[in-house]
C-alpha cells in the first residue's frame, strides 16, 4: 500500500492483507478493499467520532484520520474464437473480451492525518 503523510504527528496504525486494511491498535476497523473496487476510483474517508471511535465516512466523524483510495479496476483485452462463427455469417470469427486484472492492494493509497495528542 502506498502511504502518504498529509500532516505531522502520530498517525493511526494499520496493517494490510491481500485484500483488507485493518485500522487501529486494537484492530478497531477492518475494510475489505477488494470488495469495494469498481471501474472508477473509490475513496473511503476514515474519521473518529465524538467518542474517539473509528468511523467510515466524514459525515459521521469529527476528526479526519485517513483517506483510502482504491484505483479504478484495470482490464486486459483477450480475443477468443467465436464458437458460433461459420462462413458467411454476420458474426465475427473472434470475440474480444475484457478480463479484470486481479486486485492488488499494493496499488491502493492511504493518506494519513496526524492525530491530536
Image: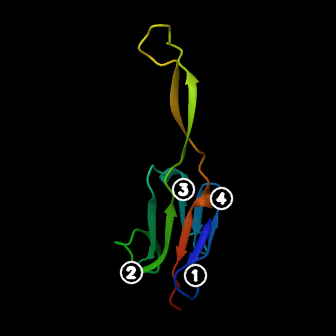
| Label 2, residues with CA under 10 Å away: few <14, some 14-19, many ≥20 | some
- Label 2 or label 3, whichever comes before in sequence order: 3
Residue 105 appears at what percent x and percent y?
A: 61, 58
Cα gap from disc 2 to disc 4, whole angstroms: 28 Å
The first of marks 1 and 4 along the sequence is 1
Q: Tell me the tag on residue 11.
A: 1
Discs 2/1, front = 1
Q: Is residue 73 above or below residue 66?
A: above
From the viewer's perspective, tell me whether residue 25 is left or right of residue 62.
Answer: right
| x, y percent for residue 4 | 57, 75
Write the residue at 60% across / 55% down: 19
Quarter of the rendering containing residue 79: top right
Q: Which of 87 and 22 is in front in this view?
A: 87
Distance from Cα at disc 2 to Cα at disc 3: 23 Å
Residue 28 vertical position relative to residue 52 in the rendered view, above or below: above
The percent position of residue 13, horizontal first and vertical second, equals 61, 75
Badge 4 marks a residue whose secondary structure is loop
Q: Which residue is drawn at 63% across and 60% down?
A: 106
x then y, percent, for residue 17: 65, 59
Q: Name the residue under label 4.
A: 17
Residue denoted by label 3: 32
Is the C-beta separation of discs 4 and 3 under 8 Å?
A: no
Frontmost residue, 74 versus 21: 74
Residue picked out by circle 2: 62
Q: Distance between the residues labelled 1 and 3?
A: 21 Å
Mark 2 to mark 1 CA distance (whole Å): 16 Å
How far, Cα to Cα, is label 4 from label 3? Answer: 9 Å
Amino acid at each position: 500500500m502506498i502511504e502518504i503523510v498529509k500532516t505531522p504527528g502520530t498517525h493511526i496504525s494499520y496493517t494490510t492483507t491481500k485484500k483488507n486494511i485493518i485500522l487501529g491498535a486494537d484492530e478497531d476497523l477492518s475494510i475489505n478493499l477488494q470488495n469495494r473496487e469498481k471501474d472508477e476510483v473509490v475513496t473511503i474517508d476514515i474519521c473518529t467520532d465524538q467518542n474517539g471511535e473509528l468511523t467510515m465516512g466524514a459525515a459521521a466523524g469529527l476528526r479526519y484520520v485517513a483517506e483510502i483510495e482504491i484505483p479504478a479496476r484495470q482490464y486486459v483485452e483477450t480475443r477468443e474464437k467465436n464458437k458460433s462463427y461459420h462462413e458467411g455469417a454476420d458474426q465475427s470469427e473472434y470475440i474480444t473480451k475484457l478480463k479484470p486484472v486481479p486486485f492488488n492492494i499494493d496499488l491502493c493509497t492511504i493518506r494519513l492525518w496526524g492525530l491530536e495528542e
